[in-house]
Amino acid sequence: MNQSKVVLFMKGSPDQPRCGFSRRIVDLLRSQGVEFSSFDILSDESVRQGLKVLNNWPTFPQLIINGEFVGGLDVVKEMVDNGELKEMLA
């Protein structure tokens, strides 16, 4: 969760997302000019299950900023819309 300032745990990779939610959050982050690293949760079941418990969030994608869980697609979209994401990354 601390491999970079912004980490996206998603299905697939940013260039080849494996679900629509992951594709949309990648597009959203890229449209905001956010630099991020990613982890394909389909490649490691223990990471996938562990993050669900650790973050108390049952679905993916999950966005982590500065080691803190932020939320999934809907939360991130709302943060973009109200300017919170830019503030958090400043």
Image: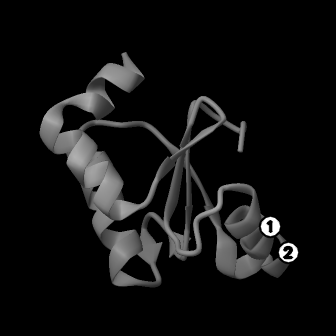
Quadrant including the C terminus: top left
Left or right, 32 with respect to 5, comes to left
Quadrant including the N terminus: top right
- Is the residue under label 2 in contact with that under label 1 (CB below 8 Å)? yes
Left or right, 61 with respect to 32, comes to right
**Extreme residue in the front direction:** 56
In the figure, residue 67 lies in which quadrant? top right
Query: x, y percentage for residue 72?
Result: 43, 60
- Is residue 89 shown above or below 80? above
Identify the residue shown where x is 49% and y is 66%.
61
User: What amino acid does circle 2 point to?
Assistant: Ser
Disc 2 crowd, CA 10 A, few/some/many (<14, 14-19, 20+): few
How many marks overall? 2
- Is residue 51 shown above or below 88? below
The residue beneath circle 2 is 46
User: What amino acid does circle 1 point to?
Assistant: Gly
- Is residue 82 shown above or below 90? below
**Extreme residue in the top direction:** 90
Query: What secondary structure is marked by label 2?
Result: helix
The residue beneath circle 1 is 50
